[in-house]
Amino acid sequence: MPTEILMPALSPTMEEGTLAKWLVKEGDTVNAGDLLAEIETDKATMEFEAVDEGTIGKILIADGTEGVKVNTPIAVLLEEGESADDIKSGESSAPKSADAKEPAKDEKAGGEGSGKGKSAEPVAKSDTPAPAAPKDDSGERIFASPLARRIAAEKGLDLTQIKGSGPHGRIVRADVEDAKPAAAAKEAAKPADKAPAPASGPSADAVMAMYEGREFEEVKLDGMRKTIAARLTEAKQTVPHFYLRREIRLDALMKFRSDLNKQLESRGVKLSVNDFIIKACALALQAVPDANAVWAGDKVLKLKPSDVAVAVAIEGGLFTPVLKDAEMKSLSALSAEMKDLATRARDRKLAPHEYQGGTFAISNLGMFGIQNFDAVINPPHGAILAVGAGQKKPVVGSDGELTVATVMSVTLSVDHRVIDGAMGAELLQQIVENLENPMVMLA
């Protein structure tokens, strides 16, 4: 029976994407591992592989189609002996996402499996045919895999009482394997979770009406801008931010950096102030381990390594690539890694694991002359450091005399659910001490 190929989830947060380009056409024969298409997410353009062999019977979503929801059928794969005449709407077999690896053939060893973008259910061989697809009280077909129907029949489960976790609510093996009749009925009786109310604000039509008669250009939102808008709106509405501000004297760091760069010149290494800031934050998280944490809904996760994210501005948005184990790396290693991540971020060539995770972020606008600002926390991070420009200012020296120093203003935005005020102040104090005494970061 023809098999649907579904729009894959290429990252844990992906809900929709753009089918940028098909690399195959109808009638082409494909094998597992062959490239099928290029999918554009909110962050990058990624290649999409086949997990099974067959013939592309029909392409359902055309090149360039935007807003394709995850698990939407995008093509139909035909097995040997099948033809396009076998394709009937809604009658294809268990859908397969081309992003997933081919499931194990042995049921015990491979199981049903789960993975990013994986929607094909491995079916164990059995001499017992699967029961016919059941229907609910209104006569509508209940979609369940053959294996799920077989297990349900053996256990005496009523599929109308089981909520499916597969694509489009399809009941799969995992839904019935551990279910009990009473439990299944109880699960079905649970009220559906209420969707959060949308943020209030004027509608698009209302805003357009305000500017009727004025010359303007309408800019269509791409996936990245939509994601930024949604996530940061959610962050400001749901994360209880508080802010801690300090000024840091940079003269010792600037001299130390200049001396180091002279010594590293033969190796082609040039350290930036941002490299020192990354190192200072990584070491501060080790000094205040309770602050090296993220909010996880009903719990706090404390990480052992310092995985520091750094905001990188790109055309149309930003990335926050993560430097993992930053406390263990030398300044030159951090500098080289940051340059590589920033370059690939601007080219939208980062893999999801390179910009997801971390507990702490840095946003540096000092190179734009910004003196100070408050950054928005990127959930689930516990804090973000906003860094302004270093400026010459009059200060009172240790001997009480007025002098001039290079001073940088920083603001630590903190999630109060994760980090309390005193702990946040201690973390910021550690960052200040590291930057004002840079040699200690090499100890």
Image: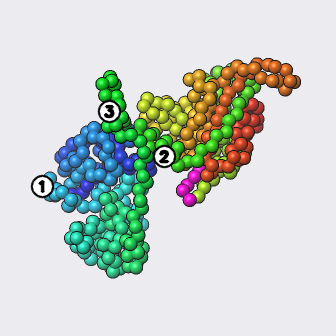
Rendering quarter of residue 349: top left
Distance Cα–Cα, label 3 vs label 2 = 27 Å
Residue stretch in magenta = 293-298
Q: SS for tag 3?
A: helix
> Quick one: 218 or 359, which is closer to the camera?
218
Name the residue beneath numbered marker 2: 234
Q: Is residue 84 visible?
A: yes
Residue at the disc numbered 1: 85
Label placed on residue 17: none
Q: On the image, numbered disc 3 is attached to which residue?
A: 209
Q: Amino acid at mark 1?
A: Asp
Q: Residue at x 52, y 43 (%)?
A: 236
Image coords of residue 193 (percent x, y): 42, 62
Neighbor class of circle 1 (other Cα within 10 Å; few <14, some 14-19, many 20+) is few
Mark 2 neighbour class, 10 Å CA radius: few under 14, some 14 to 19, many 20 or more:
some
Left or right: where 439 falls relative to 99: right
Give the amino acid at mark 2.
Glu
